[in-house]
Image (cartoon, rainbow, N blue to C red):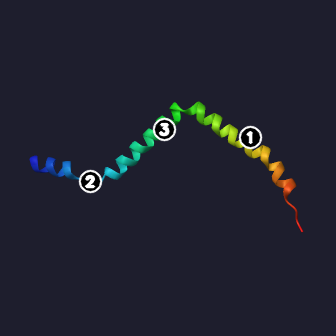
Amino acid sequence: MGKWLKEFWYEEDGVGVIEIILILVILVMLIVIFRDKLKDIVEKAFSSISNGTGKINTDMKIK
């Protein structure tokens, strides 16, 4: 039993998967916490993009 426990303790095959899962959990928590601020930022970015498209089209000249 002691040998099996020692081998299990030093086994590192699943470490990468656990790290990825922990990172995803932290990202989801941050998104939930800052949901309102992220929503405002995205809305401002898209409104800025849609407002600026008229300038791009009028400034282009085809020769």
Residue 41: percent from left, percent from top: 64, 38
Residue named by callout 2: 12
From this view, report whether residue 62 is shown above or below residue 1: below
Question: For the residue labelled by badge 2, is the local secondary structure a helix, a strand or a loop?
Answer: loop
In space, the residues marked 1 and 3 are separated at their CA atoms by: 25 Å
Residue 22 numbered tag: none
Q: Name the quadrant containing residue 42.
A: top right
Residue 48: percent from left, percent from top: 74, 43
Residue 47 numbered tag: 1
Q: Is residue 1 visible?
A: no
Q: Residues within 10 Å of mark 2 (few under 14, many from 20)?
A: few
Q: Nearer the viewer, residue 17 or 1?
A: 17
Residue named by callout 3: 28
Which badge, 3 or 2, comes first in the chain's sequence? Answer: 2
Q: Residue at x 45, y 43 (%)?
A: 24
Nearer to us of marks 2 and 1 is 1
In the rendered image, the quadrant that contains the C terminus is bottom right
In space, the residues marked 3 and 2 are separated at their CA atoms by: 25 Å
